[in-house]
Image (cartoon, rainbow, N blue to C red):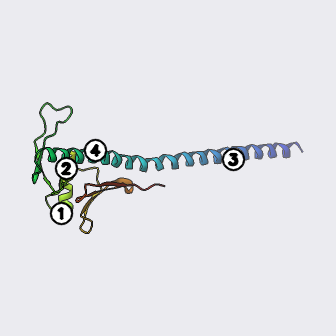
């Protein structure tokens, strides 16, 4: 009888260890899913910052355009932090309503407008498009986020995917 009780005790100990491993694996799976789910939200957060920058720059450009007599182009001069010499001035085409416009109504023109207004090369963008019907530049970021700039109204819209 004694050997059978020892075997049962060992078997119960093995079951306990197996149960502990299963619980640990479940906890790791939950933590992993939450971590990787937050990566998408961090990627879309980058486009939220770009939307804020875009809104500020478009508003500033329109104010400057109004103050300088409403011309067809606007000269923008940027100062970059950490640089002694300011960046070269940029000439941006303006609509008759005072909104910055791409040189051409194409995806390439929209990317060039991004570079002119935000002062970066747009490497964080996954894709750029032009919507001919809405007359809008579409900028696609990671995690399904999309920034749309409507040329006629200056409206900037950010669409993000939420889980």
Give the Cα separation between the discs numbered 1 and 3.
62 Å
Q: Is mark 2 on a helix, strand or loop?
A: helix
Q: Is mark 3 on a helix, strand or loop?
A: helix
**Is residue 95 or residue 70 the one in the foreground?**
70
Q: Do the residues labelled 1 and 2 touch (CB within 8 Å)?
A: no
Residue that carries the numbered disc 3 in the rendered image: 19
Answer left or right for 139 relative to 7.
Answer: left
Q: Residues within 10 Å of mark 3 (few under 14, many from 20)?
A: few
- How crowded pointer 2 is (Cα within 10 Å; few <14, some 14-19, many 20+) is rated as some
Mark 4 touches mark 2? (CB < 8 Å): no
Dot 1 or dot 2, earlier in sequence: 1
Q: Say the numbered circle drawn on residue 115.
A: 2
Mark 1 or mark 3, which is nearer to you?
Answer: 1
Local secondary structure at mark 1: loop
Judged by depth in the image, the label closer to the viewer, 2 or 3, is 2
Q: Where is residue 4 in the image (x, y as percent from the top left)?
A: 85, 46
Kindly identify the residue that appears in the image at 56 percent across and 48 percent down: 30
Give me the residue at 22% from left, 46% from top.
118
Calculate the distance from the C-alpha at mark 2 to the C-alpha at mark 3: 56 Å
Q: Quadrant of the N terminus?
A: top right
- Which of the marked residues, 1 or 3, is nearer the chain's N terminus? 3
Work out whether residue 49 can be spotted: yes
Provide residue 3's location: percent of width, then percent of height: 84, 44
Residue depicted at 15% across the width and 57% down the height: 96
Quarter assignment of residue 80: top left
Task: Please give the residue where the numbered disc 1 appears in the rendered image.
Answer: 105
Left/right of residue 83 with respect to residue 43 in the rendered view: left
Check the image and name the residue furthest to the bottom: 133
* Horizontal and vertical percent position of residue 23: 65, 46
Residue at the disc numbered 4: 53
């Amino acid at each position: 009888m004694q050997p059978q009780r020892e075997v049962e005790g060992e078997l119960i100990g093995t079951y306990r260890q197996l149960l502990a491993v299963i619980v640990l694996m479940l906890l790791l799976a939950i933590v992993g899913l939450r971590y990787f789910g937050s990566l998408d939200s961090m990627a879309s957060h980058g486009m939220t910052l770009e939307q804020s920058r875009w809104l500020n720059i478009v508003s500033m450009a329109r104010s400057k355009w109004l103050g300088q007599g409403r011309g067809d182009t606007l000269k923008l001069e940027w100062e970059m932090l950490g640089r002694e010499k300011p960046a070269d001035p940029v000439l941006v085409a303006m609509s008759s309503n005072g909104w910055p416009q791409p040189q051409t109504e194409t995806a390439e023109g929209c990317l060039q407008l991004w570079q002119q207004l935000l002062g970066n090369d747009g490497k964080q963008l996954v894709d750029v498009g032009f919507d001919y019907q809405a007359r809008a530049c579409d900028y696609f970021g990671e995690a399904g986020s999309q920034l749309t700039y409507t040329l006629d109204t200056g409206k900037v819209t950010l669409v993000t995917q939420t889980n």
